[in-house]
Amino acid sequence: MFDRVFAPYSARQWGVPVGALDASILARVPVVVGEDDRYFTDRYQVMPRDGYSALFERLLDHPNIHVSLNTAMAGVEPATWDRMVYCGPLDDYFGRSAGALPYRSVRFAHRAVDVREGLPVGTVNHPQAPDFTRVTDFRHLTDEAGPTTALVTEYPTAHAPGVTEPHYPVLCEASGRLADDYRAMARTLAGKVWFAGRLADFRYYNMDQAVGRALSLVDKTLAPAVAGMAA
């Protein structure tokens, strides 16, 4: 099972032999003895009622929020802010001065098909495929019904800074040491800049973990800091 499923899938996903990866990567894969075929067994599993786009539109619809797109870090003037939460790649913030941290990117191929050509479940993994890892059928996630469905195929790719978008931190012994060097740099900015998220923490978070990280940062760090400055 390991050689036929986990090893080839992981090697394609991460671009390195599976033995080079941190053990936490494979620990994310649940091993189930029984008839429950769900990947996630959380009690509550939901999608935003109107989709993620509408969710973020409402979150950003505030007079104190300004959104700037296609803006490089160099274009953010430090004099205009007192505190910042940074969610980009950890090494990018420091100009990759200690070396480049490894991230993986993904190319998404979208297509609409007749529902008869859809998938029997939400996502199907393809461990033996030559260049892609999985295909998702979104009607299972949104519970929509119609004559067609939207499929997306994921093709893992190498990440090139400035060319592709980083999606996953590649966790291994060497990257862990380099990330620790950058975290030491980040600690010198305590009280001014907070680093959070999959890229800035250089941690492989699931969605719920990323949200939990944000809420914890606000409750335990940002709120007390703002209250202290107000006082």
Image: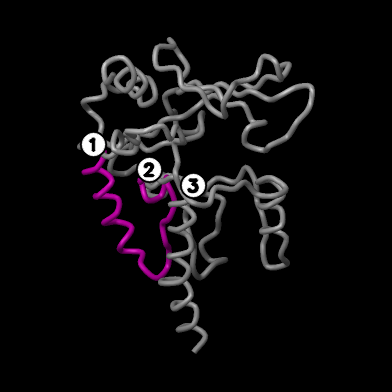
Q: Position of residue 91 (x, y in %)?
A: 37, 44
Looking at the rendering, the stretch of residues picked out in magenta corresponds to 174-203
**Is residue 57 placed above or below 170 in the rendered structure?**
below
Q: Secondary structure at mark 2?
A: loop
Question: Which quadrant would residue 159 be assigned to in this image?
Answer: top left
Distance from the alpha carbon under mark 2 to that under mark 1:
12 Å
Q: Residue furthest bottom?
A: 231
Q: Position of residue 84 (x, y in %)?
A: 49, 63
Residue to which mark 2 is pinned: 204
Q: Quadrant of the N terminus?
A: top left
Nearer to us in this view, 138 or 15:
138
Residue to which mark 1 is pinned: 23
Q: Position of residue 130 (x, y in %)?
A: 43, 10
Distance from the alpha carbon under mark 3 to that under mark 2:
10 Å
Residue to which mark 3 is pinned: 207
Badge 1 amino acid: Ala
**Is residue 93 placed above or below 226 in the rendered structure?**
above
Nearer to us in this view, 127 or 35:
35
Q: Position of residue 179 (x, y in %)?
A: 28, 46
**Is residue 80 placed above or below 133 in the rendered structure?**
below
Q: Residues within 10 Å of mark 1 (few under 14, many from 20)?
A: few
Q: Secondary structure at mark 3?
A: helix
Distance from the alpha carbon under mark 1 to that under mark 3:
20 Å
